[in-house]
Image (cartoon, rainbow, N blue to C red):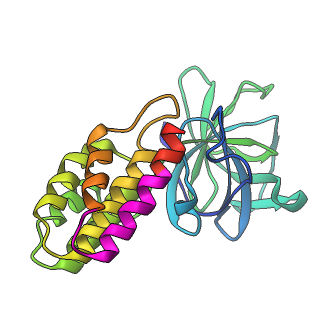
Amino acid sequence: MDAALPVQIEAIEPGTVRRRPRRSRHVRLQVGDGATIAVYDPQTVVTPDAVGTEREMELSAEVPAVESRPTGEAGIAARSGGDAVTFYGIVVTVDEAGTEALLDVGSGTVRFDTSSVDRRLYVGDFLELADPVVHVTGMSPTGRSYEAYLSQLDSDDPAARREAATHLGHRGRERAVDRLVAQFRAEHDPSVRRAVVTALGRLAVTARRPDERPDPRIRSTLEAATGDEAREVRDAADDWLDRVASYWFS
């Protein structure tokens, strides 16, 4: 079952990025009306570049306590300085086995494991999910589709191509590498080449899991960009090569 909430990445906990061995990432997410969730993210690599950006994240919750509430408003409330969060909402889906359910909390939905619930849940139940541990299972910027941004690289407008490269870099999908590498080779506008370099650098540290290496074409393109005629492109390439080397090859 899909579950998604519009969130803003507030901060990455100190010491959880670029440390070996890389076992997990911890991120603070601002959700809904300002509630903050401390997220344990074992699969998706969230880099410092993501701080301050808006995302739509698929979430699941392991819930130690579920309480019925006869009436109330859907929403999210943070407690204990943001280290705990409570979801209030209506059950909108329960799977056939009764082991997973989807809770509508107003600003989005949260999928949760019902194994700790001592009774059967039904669609329409109003629940309070207390102190869940939330796991990120995927992330992507809100708005237009991935394919739309891939097509936008063909635009005659440099600003549109620059926007497309920027969004593709935030998506963390390696199928954009082909297009971005080709775009760098053909691109005549230095601001777009810089955006492509940044996108490729981001993909190198977000598109794969910690036990995998990035597409070698990313590194070769970044190396080629260090000799670009535009200083802004050279500087971006140097910066991202350092980050990629630090993250994957140190």
Which residue appears at 78% of the width and 61% of the height? 77
Residue 61: percent from left, percent from top: 67, 39
| Residue at point 78%, 52% (across, down) | 86
For the question of whether residue 144 can be seen, the reply is: no
Q: Mostly what secondary structure, the magenta segment?
A: helix
Magenta residue check for 240: yes
- Residue at x-position 77% and y-position 29%: 117
Left or right, 209 with reference to 176? right
Residues shaded magenta? 227-243
Residue 211, image x, y percentages: 51, 28
In the displayed structure, does residue 199 sit left or right of residue 190? Answer: right
- Which residue does the image show at 53% across and 23% down from the upper left? 96
Please say whether residue 65 is one of the residues in the magenta stretch. Answer: no
How many callouts does the rendering have? Answer: 0
Residue 248 x/y as whole percent: 49, 39
Nearest to the observer: residue 82 or residue 195: 195
